[in-house]
Amino acid sequence: MSITFENHVSADSSAGRFTRGASVVVVEREAVFRAALRNVLSRECGFDVVAETGSGQEAGQLMRAHSPQIVLMELELARAAGLHAHRWGGTLPRPPKLVLFGTAPGAETLDAALEAGALGFVTRTLDTRLLEAVLRHVLTGGCAIGADVFDGLMGSEDQRPVPRFLDHHHKVALLNESERRVLRLLGRGLDNSRIAAELHLSRTSVKTYVSRILGKLHLENRTQAALVANETGLVEQVRMSGRAGPGQGSELAL
């Protein structure tokens, strides 16, 4: 799997050779897992683990003492350290880049972490290549969410909203294909009746899709949805690929 969007990073992603030897502070409660992270980061990924701790509060002291480029911190410890109460590194002249790890988060949790200043998230699977790809992508200025986290959001319940903090391109990527088809037609200015005819759906089904799209993308009305469809290139994609023939594109699942 390759990088599709800036915030979606897979194990095949590469940020280049200029991030070799980057300094990292590891913040994790369990000593065994902390040691495993240290070994993976230093021996397999080529990072320089300059310090580690099992305390979110002590992490601040280590950042001031070592000035690391990245802090890899367990999500629960970040919460305990008040991550969601204030923006990350607000008191530091040059705060390190923060990457969180833990159980795959829901959209609201991920949104809160990103808004507070985190630049990446990976799960606790210790997938060496994926962990390295996320850290290197963050080091080169990106916002990186591990592909396993991203896939979990895409496979979540249809009614779950996507993170507010993501831009429109990233949000649209988390819609399912059926929702994107309806959004494309909204972008072309079609009303519900014409969308229903185009996709061979009932008007009730179209209304359900439109409501779902507005809720997922945190939009207030159809006009905003049409603007997003055009901004993200969905309408242009239809023009380039050509109009679907009769009977095509009609299988949508609610």
Image (spheres, helix red, strand yellow):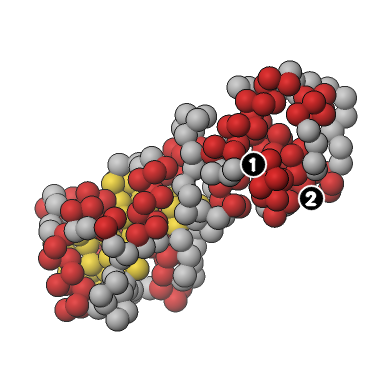
Q: Residue at x 47, y 54 (%)?
A: 165
Quadrant of the image occupied by residue 188: top right
Q: Considering depth in this image, is 245 or 33 the residue closer to the camera?
A: 245
**Left or right position of 121 against 189:** left
Residue at the outermost bottom position:
93
Label 2 to label 1: alpha-carbon separation: 21 Å
**Left or right position of 199 against 111:** right
Q: Residue at x 64, y 41 (%)?
A: 221
Which amino acid, mark 2? Glu
* Residues at circles 2 and 1 in contact by the CB criterion of under 8 Å: no
Q: Considering depth in this image, is 116 or 40 the residue closer to the camera?
A: 116
Q: Residue at x 48, y 65 (%)?
A: 142
For label 2, the SS is helix
Image position, residue 244 (x, y; %): 84, 33
Q: Considering depth in this image, is 150 or 189 the residue closer to the camera?
A: 189
Question: Which quadrant is home to the C terminus?
Answer: top right
Image position, residue 51 (x, y; %): 17, 69
Which amino acid, mark 1? Asn
Residue 35 seen by the camera:
no
For label 1, the SS is loop
Mark whose residue sits in front, 2 or 1:
1
Residue placed under numbered mark 1 in the picture = 221
Q: Considering depth in this image, is 176 or 124 the residue closer to the camera?
A: 176
Quadrant of the image occupied by residue 83: bottom left
Residue placed under numbered mark 2 in the picture = 236
Image position, residue 212 (x, y; %): 58, 32
Q: Residue at x 80, y 41 (%)?
A: 189
Image position, residue 160 (x, y; %): 47, 34
- Mark seen at residue 185: none
Q: Earlier in the sequence, mark 2 or mark 1?
A: 1
